[in-house]
Image (cartoon, rainbow, N blue to C red):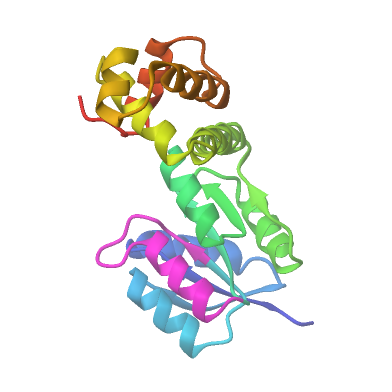
């Protein structure tokens, strides 16, 4: 029977020993090594033929997120399962970007942990149920930020100049004087800005400019 080669990475030796005892109860899993920090995890990934790595996040020196980035870059075949007490959106987003195959909380049922290891080896991804909703919220937030940035990419250089002056509270006449263009041209630029930013008035446009850090307040 071919066994799944697993490495446990955690800075607490008691947790590593506990996980080892749990995992080795399954005849399919073989714990081939352990590491107590991120650099140790990187070294093990480089020096062994491990298939799955259980990765803690908060560790001295190189943390689990940075270690994951290095390992996935140098040893992309290694499946990494984040096993942590954190369900913070920032941790989730960073680890998903880094390329983890699973994200589990340390209060998970041992059978679920073993099942996760078997699934990621087959190419599946496993996320703890309580994290799924937060992950969706984070992805939605990132999508909104990207959408906002895309709006400003549609603005011309002249429209950005006009928008900055709007945010500074200048009138159409003052804007025209500063940019050496007519008030009619200013109005045309403003109409275009409102349409591209999907706003209805100067105040909303100014708020968009401030949020995008086009102007300092």
Q: Which residues are magenta?
A: 54-76
Q: Position of residue 38 (x, y in %)?
A: 36, 69
Residue 75 is covered by the magenta coloring: yes
Left or right, 151 with reference to 206: right
Left or right, 133 with reference to 43: right
Q: Position of residue 100 (x, y in %)?
A: 56, 60
Left or right, 209 with reference to 77: left
Q: Is any part of residue 6 visible from this angle?
A: yes
**Residue at 30% in and 12% down:** 171
The answer to whether residue 36 is above or below residue 156 is below
**Residue at 44% in and 73% down:** 70
Report the number of numbered marks. 0
Q: Residue 74 versus residue 147: which sits nearer the camera?
A: 147
Instruction: Kindly indicate the quadrant of the structure image that contains residue 173.
Output: top left
Instruction: Kindly indicate the quadrant of the structure image that contains residue 59.
Output: bottom left
Q: Residue 46 versus residue 172: which sits nearer the camera?
A: 172
Q: Position of residue 209 (x, y in %)?
A: 36, 27
**Residue at 41% in and 21% down:** 186
């Amino acid at each position: 029977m071919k066994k799944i080669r697993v490495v446990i990475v955690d800075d607490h030796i008691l947790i590593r020993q506990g996980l080892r005892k749990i995992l080795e109860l399954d005849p399919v899993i073989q714990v081939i090594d352990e590491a107590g920090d991120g650099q140790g995890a990187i070294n093990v990934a480089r020096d062994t033929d491990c298939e799955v790595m259980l990765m803690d996040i908060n560790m001295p020196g190189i943390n689990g997120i940075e270690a994951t980035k290095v390992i996935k870059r140098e040893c992309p075949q290694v499946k990494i399962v984040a096993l942590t007490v954190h369900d913070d959106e920032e941790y989730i987003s960073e680890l998903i970007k880094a390329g983890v195959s699973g994200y589990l909380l340390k209060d998970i049922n041992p059978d679920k942990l073993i099942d996760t290891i078997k699934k990621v080896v087959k190419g599946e991804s496993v996320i703890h149920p309580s994290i799924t909703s937060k992950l969706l919220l984070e992805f939605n937030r990132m999508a909104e930020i990207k959408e906002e940035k895309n709006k400003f990419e549609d603005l011309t250089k002249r429209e950005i100049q006009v928008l900055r002056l709007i945010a500074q509270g200048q009138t159409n006449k003052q804007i025209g004087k500063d940019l050496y263009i007519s008030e009619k041209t200013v109005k045309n630029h403003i109409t275009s800005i409102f349409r591209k930013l999907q706003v209805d008035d100067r105040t909303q446009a100014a708020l968009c400019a401030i949020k995008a850090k086009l102007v300092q307040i």
